[in-house]
Image (tube, helix red, strand yellow):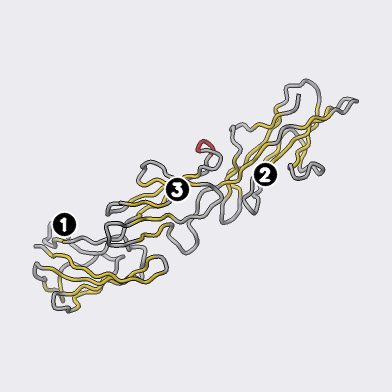
Amino acid sequence: PEPVIVTDTNSNVICVDFITDQVVRPLTLEVDNDVPGSYTYAWYLSTDLVNAIATGPSYTVDTADPNGATRTYVVVMTSTSDLLCSQASASFDVIQSGQAVVPAGQIGYTVSNAFSDLQTITVTVDGYGTYQYSLDDGPRQDSPVFTDVPMGEHTITVWDTEGGLANSCDPLILSGVSIIDYPHYFTPNGDGINETWNIVGLSNQINAKIYIFDRQGKLLKQISPTAAGWDGTYNGALMPATDYWFLVEYFEGNTAKEFKAHFSLKR
């Protein structure tokens, strides 16, 4: 009978860091041979059945293919008897996958149609794997696009599915994900609830600018989305309960955008 290539994990996947090409989870291939006797073993890539890459009853795949390709292995078993009979195994595919990574200089997602009721969050990652996506531990989906996401912070998980979920590499967790919107009112009355006003979902845009005006167009405050927000005062004086206007300058992807609207101060 021909030898059989097996693994102790019943997996055929190696996990590779997409940025460094370092193997973070190697895979050891072993020979399953029930035929009594003494044998030698030689390991080959299916693309070159002349030059052996290793000998012995096992072989560890611990290097990455630079193109992320699946590699196929064959082991040849040879009897040490005078007959020197040889038998080759069936081919065994080793799939190269890995945890998803956020592209350099990005945050892993883009919010489209900010400040509207039709906002979408599109996940943008790289990696060797095939990925699924879930929002707040909800159901997994093949599409990297989420719609109808409510205001507030959310968590997106990017799941590797190359070779099946049972053999998947580590998931990528994107925390603090939020659509871009604004509170329609705030209540700076000292009770510790809604004491300040700010845009939600722009904390990762340190260069975004928010200007707050009164009804006559007077600039009252410039704030940053990374700060606490406006406390309802101007030069230390409490501003009256009424509507105020704002202008926000921000980016959607690489496109500079502006948005204007108003909100209420309630006391």
List the residue tagged with mark 3: 158
Under mark 1, the amino acid is: Gly
Q: Nearer the viewer, residue 40 or 87?
A: 87
> What is the x, y in percent for residue 111?
36, 59
Mark 3 → mark 1, Cα distance in angstroms: 36 Å
Residue shown at 67% from the left, 44% from the top: 71
Residue at the far front in the pictured view: 118
Q: Is residue 143 left or right of residue 48?
A: left
Identify the element where label 3 is drawn: strand
Say which residue label 1 marks: 192
Q: Quadrant of residue 61?
A: top right
Name the foreground residue: 134 vs 143. Answer: 143
Q: Amino acid at mark 3?
A: Val
Q: Choose top left, top right, bottom left or bottom right for residue 88.
A: top right
User: Which residue shows up at 76% across the image and 43% down it?
Assistant: 53
Q: Position of residue 45 (x, y in %)?
A: 74, 43
Task: Give residue 129's position: percent from left, percent from top.
Answer: 54, 47
Near mark 2 (Cα within 10 A), the count class, few <14, some 14-19 or many ≥20, is: some
Residue neighbourhood size for the residue with mark 1, other residues' Cα within 10 Å, grouped as few (<14), some (14–19), many (≥20)? few
Ranked by sequence position, the earlier of labels 3 and 2 is 2
Q: Nearer the viewer, mark 2 or mark 1?
A: 2
State the image coordinates of residue 195 (x, y, percent, origin top left).
17, 61
Q: Is residue 153 above or below residue 32?
A: below
- Whether residue 142 is situated above or below residue 243 in the rendered picture: above
| 32 sits to left or right of 181 | right
Checking the image for residue 71, the label placed there is 2
Local secondary structure at mark 2: strand
- Real-space Cα separation, disc 2 to disc 1, in angstroms: 60 Å
Disc with the residue nearer the chain's start (3 vs 1): 3
Q: Are marks 3 and 1 in contact (CB under 8 Å)?
A: no
Q: What is the quadrant of the N terminus in the image?
A: top right
**Residue sitting at 10 percent across and 62 percent down?**
266
